[in-house]
Amino acid sequence: MEAAAAAAAAKPAIRVAAICGSLRKASFNRGLIRCAIELCSESIPGMRIEHVDIEPLPFCNPDLEIDGKFPPPVEAFRRKILEADSILFASPEYNYSLSAPLKNAIDWGSRPPNVWGDKTAAIVSAAGGSGGIHSQYHLRQVGVFIDLHFINKPELFIQGYRPPVKFDGDGNLIDPETKERLKRVLLSLQAFTHRLSRSS
């Protein structure tokens, strides 16, 4: 384990853009991103996660593109995605699918030139009865068109309200088992990103 950590630290740090599909400040999915940032800082050398806020983005409308330029919030968002090596989606589930803010962000990023292309990605979800399984699979379908490469395993679907308590009142992840599962997702994303970079 120590040798693997040392090897990971010796490679260039992977830059991960984390995107939450919920706009709620106490969202469980935002809590997953906060926990992922903490896990990387504490125990995953060679991986840096930055939360990229999608709330300032206007509704996707090509009429807002003037002289080949996007509105400033869109330009800033696209730059963050372009500079990242990997994407971490925290996707809630709305009506059996991904949320409107997340789809809007994806659509802005896919406007020519597509800034998502050829990046690795992972999805985690906290939702009601399904844990977000429908939203994740819809997001994977979207990823095919925008040329994202998702890790297949492990999958993380969290039934947020089922015992034991997994989040506190502020949306922070407090369940040790779920934290460990999230860490395994991050390690898989890290390994997959290194593997693809070697083959390119």
Image: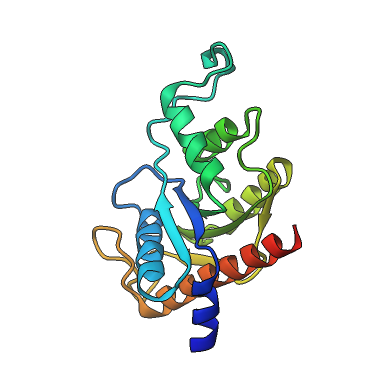
Q: Residue at x 42, y 38 (%)?
A: 54
Residue 190 spot, x, y in % from top left = 57, 67
Q: Would residue 155 be visible to someone looking at this image?
A: no
* 31 and 18: which is toward the camera: 18
Q: Is residue 111 left or right of residue 94?
A: right
* 17 and 102: which is toward the camera: 17
Residue 53 spot, x, y in % from top left = 39, 41
Is residue 165 depicted above or below 99 in this figure?
below
- Quadrant for the C terminus, please: bottom right
Is residue 31 depicted above or below 80 in this figure?
below
Q: Residue furthest right?
A: 199
Q: Is residue 2 left or right of residue 53?
A: right
Residue 128 spot, x, y in % from top left = 45, 58
Residue 93 spot, x, y in % from top left = 51, 50
Q: Residue at x 63, y 34 (%)?
A: 110
Q: Is residue 44 left or right of residue 195?
A: left
Q: Residue at x 41, y 52 (%)?
A: 50
Q: Is residue 196 left or right of residue 37?
A: right
Total marks drawn?
0
* 91 and 51: which is toward the camera: 51
* 158 and 61: which is toward the camera: 61
Q: Would residue 129 be visible to someone looking at this image?
A: yes
Is residue 87 depicted above or below 156 in this figure?
above
Q: Residue at x 48, y 25 (%)?
A: 59
Is residue 175 depicted above or below 120 in this figure?
below
